[in-house]
Each structure stands twice: as structure tokens, then as C-alpha cells.
Image: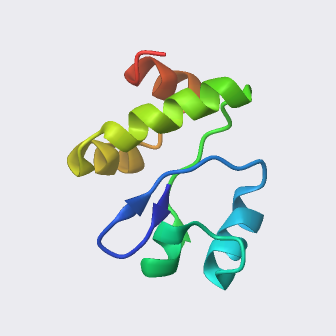
Amino acid sequence: MLDCGDRLYTGIALDPVKRLASHRSGARGARFTRAFPPRAIVYQAAIGARSLALRAEARLKKLPRSRKLAIVAQQPAAAELLAMLGL
């Protein structure tokens, strides 16, 4: 998850630091991050399988901001995050 000011951006990447740089440059960043530039990575988890990561991303995006902020505060391990998301 990226801190984009008063918003959080959720996505998947093999190299989160490199992906953050591409979001910041605007060249290959998401449309959302062009409108709301990311400040920092606030949470990341190594999920493993791409399909599972995509499902986790979809579930995270549906959560209310308060639940996302709780996840950022807790910094759960990948297995714990998946359990929280019911995966």
C-alpha cells in the first residue's frame, strides 16, 4: 500500500521500490497515482503466487479506509493478512 496523501493506493509488484519509482515518475504509473502522487510505501507483504496476490489486492481495495489504516498500523505478516482477508 502506498500513502498518497489522504488516500491509500493498493497494488501488486515484484519489486515494490522500483514500482514506487515508476509511479512517482508518471511514465508507467497508474492513473490514480498520477492524480495522487505517492509519498511512501506504508505496507507490503510477500504473498508468493500472483493469483493469490491479485485476489488479496481485490479484497483490500474493497475494505473501508479505517480497516486499511488498521492493517498499516498492525503490519501483519503475509499469512496473517491472508487470514484477515479470508483467503
Determine the image quadrant of residue 45.
top right
Residue shown at the point (49%, 16%) measured from the top left = 87
39 horizontally vs 74: left or right: right
Mark count: 0
> 36 and 48: which one is in front?
36
> 75 and 18: which one is in front?
18
Residue that extends furthest to the front in the rendered view of this protein: 31
Q: Image height check: is 42 above or below 14?
A: below
38 horizontally vs 59: left or right: right
Q: Where is residue 52 in the image (x, y as percent from the top left)?
A: 62, 24
Q: Position of residue 28 (x, y in %)?
A: 71, 71
43 horizontally vs 86: left or right: right
Q: How is the image coloured?
A: rainbow
Residue shown at the point (39%, 60%) measured from the top left = 8
Q: Where is residue 51 in the image (x, y as percent from the top left)?
A: 67, 25
Mark yes or no: residue 76 visible: no
Residue that extends furthest to the bottom in the rendered view of this protein: 25
Mark yes or no: residue 18 visible: yes
> 58 and 86: which one is in front?
58
Q: Image height check: is 48 above or below 17?
A: above
Residue shown at the point (32%, 38%) measured from the top left = 62
Q: Image height check: is 67 above or below 77?
A: below
Q: Position of residue 76 (x, y in %)?
A: 48, 35
Residue shown at the point (33%, 46%) measured from the top left = 68
